[in-house]
Every structure is written in structure tokens, then in C-alpha cells.
Amino acid sequence: MCAFAPVSTSTSSRLPERSALPVAPPAPAGAVSLNLGDLAPDFTAQTADGEIRFHEWLGDSWGVLLSHPADFTPVCTTELGAVARLRDEFAARDTKVAAVSIDPASSHRAWSADIAETQGAEVNFPLIADPDRRVATLYGMIHPRHDTTATVRSVFVIGPDKIIKLTLTYPASTGRHFGEILRVLDSLQLTAAHQLATPADWQPGQDVIITPAVSDQEATRRFPNHRAIKPYLRLTPHPSRPWSPN
């Protein structure tokens, strides 16, 4: 039977004590966490251009809901200018975009002029006013350990069924990459139409993956030019738009 030698506890050989690691406080009561597959909360709110009833406004389109920390701030100004310049790209994907912050509608209207002046594009999507933080609370856009009042840079991609398909969260200091959001929309819409998935670093036009839900027999019928690298890894050329079911 093996025995371990006793460990000396003399002062000369004892390791210095380490201070306890900090423990994060529990999440605030009432904090909301929305997951993929959840129904996107509906709401009615004021915008820079009048009232919006969110689900009604979405209709049968895809949607992107963005939060920004505050009006008249530099990163947010560049972001909303970028979205305005991408109007045709979002329209080509049948996608409506709305942005929300905790500022009032009057502030949004004044800020829109600055965005147009500095970014070269008129704001062409709803800027939702949320001074009572109701929308921010519904969507969990305020992360108290990051900032107790301002929203983080949240992204929610919502399908025509009003179900959340993707969430992204950026800190206030980092502007979002809207090319990536368009890429994700392309991937999500491809999957919805064709039971196809997209590999790492995929760009539109590149080969895509046939999902495991499609049998080999069905894959041969629906994707005659596909190739099987492994039984679980089957690639096929990217379908052309419009992405309608075969």
C-alpha cells in the first residue's frame, strides 16, 4: 500500500497565501436574458418619426434590432451612418432595421441631422426612443456590470416568424461590423430556404454544407453537384438568389 509523505507546514516551507479571487455579484433582480429560439418581445414606442408597433412594423420581413449607448456619441454616429448607407443591401435581403437608445425622440431627430452631415447618408430607418428603458429591459440591453444606465451594442436578428435567430453583443467602445451582420443574414436565410449551413469564414458565393437533416438520397436529388468529404461533411455549390425552396 502506497503512502504519501506528510507535507511540511513549517513557516519556512509554506507557500505564501493568495488573496481570494473576486466573485462577481449576482445578476440584478428582473434581468432578462433572451435566447435563440425565443419570441422577440413586442412593444409600442415613439421614434424620431412617430409611433412604432414593433411586430406590426416587421410584418413578414426579417428584422435587425440594434441598441446604441447614447445619441451624439462618436462610435454610434459612424454606426448609424454605416447602416444608412447599406439600405439597399438590407432591402435586398427583405430585412428591416431599427435602432434604439435610452434618449428621447427629440434627441434622435436632432442627432439625425449630424449623422447625415458627417456620414453622408440620411437616417432611413426607425430610431426608437426608450427614455424609460422599457425596450432595453425587454431585450436585456443594459448590462449593469458594464454600465448601469446606457445600453451595450446589442444586435438581434429576428426571423419572419418573430423568433430570435441571432444575438451579438459589443462593448460601447467597439463599433459593429455590418458586413458581418449581412453575412450572417445570408447564412440564416440560406438555412431557412434550403437546409444548408455555412462553414467557417464563409462568404456568399462559396460552397456551403448540407445539414445532417438531409438524407444522402435527398441530397442527391436536391443537390446533384454536391461532394461528400466525409459522411457527415457534404459540400455543395452555393444556390443563386432568390433563395426559394427547391
Image (cartoon, helix red, strand yellow):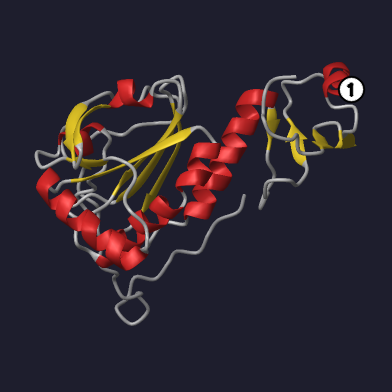
Q: Is residue 174 left or right of residue 108?
A: right
Towards the viewer: 8 or 40: 40
The answer to whether residue 72 is visible is yes
- Is the residue marked by circle 1 packed among few (<14), some (14-19), or many (20+) residues within 10 Å? few
Amino acid residing under circle 1: Thr
Q: Which residue occupies the foreground of this view, 169 or 26?
A: 169
Q: Quadrant of residue 112?
A: bottom left
Above or below: residue 30 compared with residue 221: below
Q: Is residue 117 placed above or below 69 in the rendered structure?
A: below
The quadrant of the image that shows the C terminus is top right
Q: Is residue 80 left or right of residue 44?
A: right
Q: Is residue 194 above or below residue 107?
A: above
Q: Hey, which quadrant is residue 133 in on the image?
A: top left
Give the residue at x 22% y 58%: 113
Q: Which residue is mark 1?
A: 220
Tell me the residue at 27%/51% (across/down): 68
- Residue 22: image location, x then y, percent: 25, 59
Query: Where is residue 31 drawn, in percent x and y?
Result: 21, 35
* Residue closer to the observer: 108 or 209: 108
Q: Disc 1 on helix, strand or loop?
A: helix
Q: Residue at x 33, y 42 (%)?
A: 125
Looking at the image, which residue is at 55% across and 38% down? 92
Residue 85 spot, x, y in % from top left: 44, 54
Image label count: 1
Q: Can residue 149 be seen in the rendering of this structure?
A: no
Quick one: which residue is furthest to the bottom in this view?
12
> What percent of the width, then of the height, locates residue 52?
23, 29
When the figure is inspected, residue 10 is found, relative to residue 30, above or below; the finding is below
